[in-house]
Image: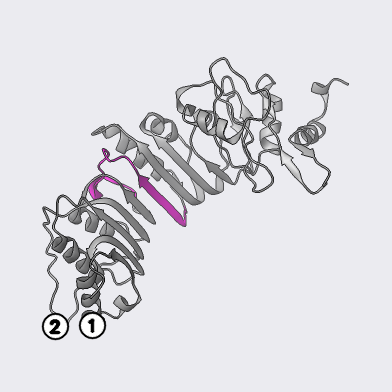
Amino acid sequence: MHLCDLPDNVLRLVLQAAVYRDRRNASLRLKSSLPLLAVCRRWRRLACASVYDTAYIKCYTRSSGGAYDSDPSEDDLKAEATKAEMTSNLDLIVTTGCVNTVKGVHIKVCNAKDIEFPRLKEFRDVCPLLESMVLPPRMDRVDISVSASALRRVSKMAPLAIKHFTLEIRSASEGDPATLTAINCILGSVHGARIFELEIKDRLLTVMPETLACTGLTHLGIAAPISLDAMLGFIRKLPNLASMGLWELVLDDIQADISVPAPEECHPMEPLDTRLKVVSINVNRSQPSWSMVTQATKYLLLRIPTLIALDAVHASYKPVMKFVDAYSKLYPHLANVKLLLNASDRSF
């Protein structure tokens, strides 16, 4: 019988055996690559569904006109990974040994339509395969790190029920409304996520509370300059927010009243309605004064009673610690907040 005529259940076992090779120790199995560059769609479908059903998927390319004679080294794969969004002749390759469970799929994307991953649990990174692959309706985790060039591709994903979803924007087009539209579309396709993260690492992409449609985020990170007023706006808009990281908090044009009442006043400040536990803020030290950064830190400490950790490395240590001691009786949560402050004035 020709190999292609084998029934699906037998061929599935052949494909599964092809990605493992035994060493002297029978318990040690190393994953190897399973090339599927020139096989029929039936083989691809069986391999994806049976061998890689619970795999992580990471995307790598080969050099133009080149090929791997053997399993590529990790350094080779990392070097090629940067080209992943620049070509449609894409291969996905098994990359790891027995230390962890990461697998990859070695597939030529061209003419590979509607590849199903019925039991896939986790997906990492983004690649042209997203145009062809059919993700299962329920997954444990999806981590997507993407540039603006691939945002539209990702925004075509069907609605998914995911326990943990992370969208990381590496680069974007400044002022391009289509970028924010695609981000909102991607976030809107996710349902039921207990961990729901958006990390915008491009300093040119400005996101404001009124331009972000999703309200279910549990983490928000923004690299672009952002005002304290916008920060407070995000906290009010995102009731499930548990952590927040701002790479450049702008304090030179504060519109909100950030005055702090005297500790002897009987009534504490009105707390923000939030679940926020961890905040990390950085400022451009060439712009605000140390006193302004310290004042903003005090204000946030009083307004966010759910805080357990505040990283404000540009706030002065002594004034903030004296403030915590003086206000802890009226604001008991201050005694439980772990603070990371500027240590240059730490010695009394």
Nearest the viewer among 205 and 75 is 75
Q: Is residue 315 above or below residue 131?
A: below
Residue 291 falls in which quadrant of the image? bottom left
Find the residue positioned furthest to the right: 1
Above or below for 250 versus 42: below
Task: Give the dominant element type of the magenta stretch: helix, strand or loop.
Answer: loop
Q: Is residue 94 left or right of residue 139?
A: right
In the displayed image of the protein, which residue is found farthest to the front?
A: 347
Vertical arrangement, residue 189 with respect to residue 333, above or below: above
At horizontal 22% and vertical 46% (from top left) the residue drawn is 225
- Can residue 216 be seen here? The reply is no
Relative image position of residue 304 (x, y in whole percent): 27, 68
Residue 18 % position (x, y): 76, 33
Residue drawn at x 59%, y 46% as measured from the top left: 121
Image marks 2 and 1: residues in contact by CB distance under 8 Å? yes
Magenta region includes residue 203:
yes
Q: Quadrant of the N terminus?
A: top right
> Label 2: which residue?
265
Q: Which residues are magenta?
A: 192-214
